[in-house]
Image (cartoon, rainbow, N blue to C red):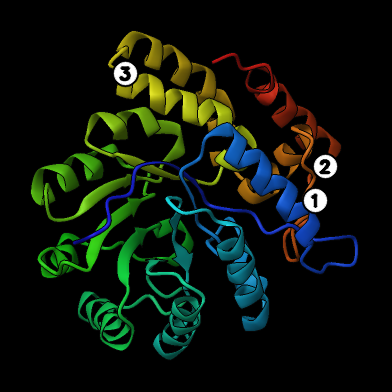
Amino acid sequence: MAMKLNGILPALVTPFDAGGDVDFKAFERLLVYLRAAGVTGWVPCGSTGEYNVMTADERAEVLKFVADFASDGEFLVAGTNASATRDVIAHTERAYDLGYRTILLSPPYYAMPAPDELLAHYQAVLDAVDVQLVVYNYPPKVGVEIGFDVLDALADNPRVIAIKESSGVLQRAVDIYTRYQGRIDLISGSDDIALDFMLWGADSWICGPANCMAGACVDLDNTFRSGDMAAAREKMAVLYRAMSSLESGKFVQKVKYGCELIGCPVGVCRQPLLPLTEAEKAEFRKSMAPILNWVA
């Protein structure tokens, strides 16, 4: 039976120390904080986790660390993306060996595959490793959209369980809900319109901002599930300013700075991403202020 994701799953940052190595002590502090905030699972090695600037061994170490930390009942979803199908399969095999049974996979970056090539890519991964697949539509990062012709071909595969939709286009969420209800679940991946996604059937939110806003994201989700739509709208309005700042640019740098603001510093990004300027920090800090004082 296919797994049904629900709740808030942080798309985890990867902490780095002053020397640029993965900082597992900082990672543990962050995971403890996020668990206390009420997240339902973990998504390491996604785009927020800077997988693209990590070695294969580092990625495996991060996956192992998170899997070892996870408790029974917490979801585990491994990011296994790469630029070539054979490398995606290798990352997926390693994830499987470490206990992951679900992967998050966008189209290969830079290649810009045509629809038939993208479908063959996903099928090759599914044929090679017995995992469940969450496809990840994020056109700004990879240059192609997962079109409905591809989703139509995947919709009746029981191991294709969901799509994380990060296009920022609400109509896509409506289309996915109406076309694939009961076959492919909708997962919120457009953080500044997360409440709209919930209205259109998203039961889970794979959320980069949850690294530094977990309590607020969990509270919004719980409020929506309780049926109090007026309160959910007001809470989304508070979250919106910070989410909008993130979407305006330097997303990962701001999320990492947000972790510093909540008392869980995780270092800075690897180059080519540079640290925020003092002006950029001040702007984001202002948008984070009501979230730092969030009362559920």
Inter-mark Cα distance, 3 to 1: 39 Å
Which quadrant: the C terminus?
A: top right
The relative height of residue 248 versus residue 16 in the rendered view (above or below) is above
Considering the numbered disc 1 on the image, is that residue within a helix, a strand or a loop? loop
Return the mark for residue 16: none
Q: Position of residue 185 (x, y in %)?
A: 22, 50
Q: Tell me if 9 is positioned left or right of 179 in this view.
A: right
Query: Which residue, as the protein is rendered here, is positioned at the far front?
Result: 72
Badge 3 or badge 1: first in the primary sequence: 3
Q: Tell me if 231 is positioned left or right of 34 in this view.
A: left
Considering the numbered disc 3 on the image, is that residue within a helix, a strand or a loop? helix
Check disc 2 and report the residue beneath it. Answer: 277
Q: Is residue 248 visible?
A: no
Q: Tell me if 2 is positioned left or right of 247 in this view.
A: left
Q: Position of residue 294 (x, y in %)?
A: 61, 17
Point out the frontmost of discs 2 and 3.
3
Residue under the point 55% across and 56% down = 70
Q: Position of residue 241 (x, y in %)?
A: 56, 24
Three-letter amino acid code of the residue under disc 3:
Ser
The relative height of residue 2 versus residue 127 in the rendered view (above or below) is above
Considering the numbered disc 2 on the image, is that residue within a helix, a strand or a loop? loop
Query: Badge 3: how crowded within 10 Å, few (<14), some, or many (20+)?
Result: few
In the figure, residue 199 lies in which quadrant? top left
* Circles 2 and 1: CB atoms closer than 8 Å: yes
Check disc 1 and report the residue beneath it. Answer: 275
Which is more toward the observer, 282 or 218?
Answer: 218
Three-letter amino acid code of the residue under disc 2:
Thr
Inter-mark Cα distance, 2 to 3: 40 Å
Check disc 3 and report the residue beneath it. Answer: 226
Inter-mark Cα distance, 2 to 1: 6 Å
* Circles 2 and 3: CB atoms closer than 8 Å: no
